[in-house]
């Protein structure tokens, strides 16, 4: 399963990827807006950490996502929040 995480803390990028790896998911993490954000592809799950992401970034990502992509939003960008989302969507 492919996961794209938008927002969150830049220093936690490695921890986000490691946790996704525990769920057998391949993760891309975009903690801040950059040119590479346009090539998110068509992930199975898109996670938005809404507390640490701008409205412009949210609109850009939601406009670029595929129809089959599930979107999960969390106000918190903690590891516990990510674990809860992955439990719910990956199992």
Image (tube, rainbow, N blue to C red):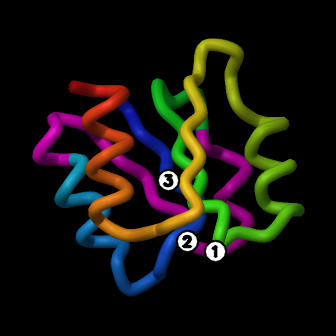
Q: How many marks?
A: 3
In the rendered structure, which segment of residues is drawn in magenta?
Answer: 21-40
Say which of marks 2 and 1 sits in front: 1
Relative placement, left or right, of 5 versus 13 is right
Sequence-wise first label, 2 or 1: 2
| In the image, residue 31 lies in the stretch drawn in magenta | yes
The C terminus - image quarter: top left
Which mark identifies residue 31? 2
Q: Quadrant of residue 23?
A: top left
Q: Residue at x 83, y 50 (%)?
A: 60
Sequence-wise first label, 3 or 2: 3
Disc 1 to disc 3, how far (Cα)? 12 Å
Q: Residue furthest bottom?
A: 11
Relative placement, left or right, of 66 versus 58 is left
| In the image, residue 10 lies in the stretch drawn in magenta | no
Disc 2 to disc 1, how far (Cα)? 8 Å
**Which residue is disc 1 drawn over?**
52
Relative placement, left or right, of 56 versus 1 is right
Sequence-wise first label, 1 or 3: 3
Residue 20 image point, x, y percent: 24, 48
**Which residue is disc 3 drawn over?**
5
Q: Residue at x 59, y 33 (%)?
A: 71
């Amino acid at each position: 399963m492919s996961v794209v995480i938008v927002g969150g803390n830049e220093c936690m990028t490695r921890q986000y990827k490691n946790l996704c790896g525990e769920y057998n998911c391949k993760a891309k993490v975009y903690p801040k807006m950059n040119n590479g954000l346009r090539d998110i592809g068509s992930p199975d799950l898109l996670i938005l950490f809404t507390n640490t992401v701008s409205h412009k970034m949210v609109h850009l990502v939601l406009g670029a996502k595929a129809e089959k992509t599930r979107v999960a939003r969390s106000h918190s960008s903690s590891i516990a929040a990510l674990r809860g989302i992955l439990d719910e969507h990956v199992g």
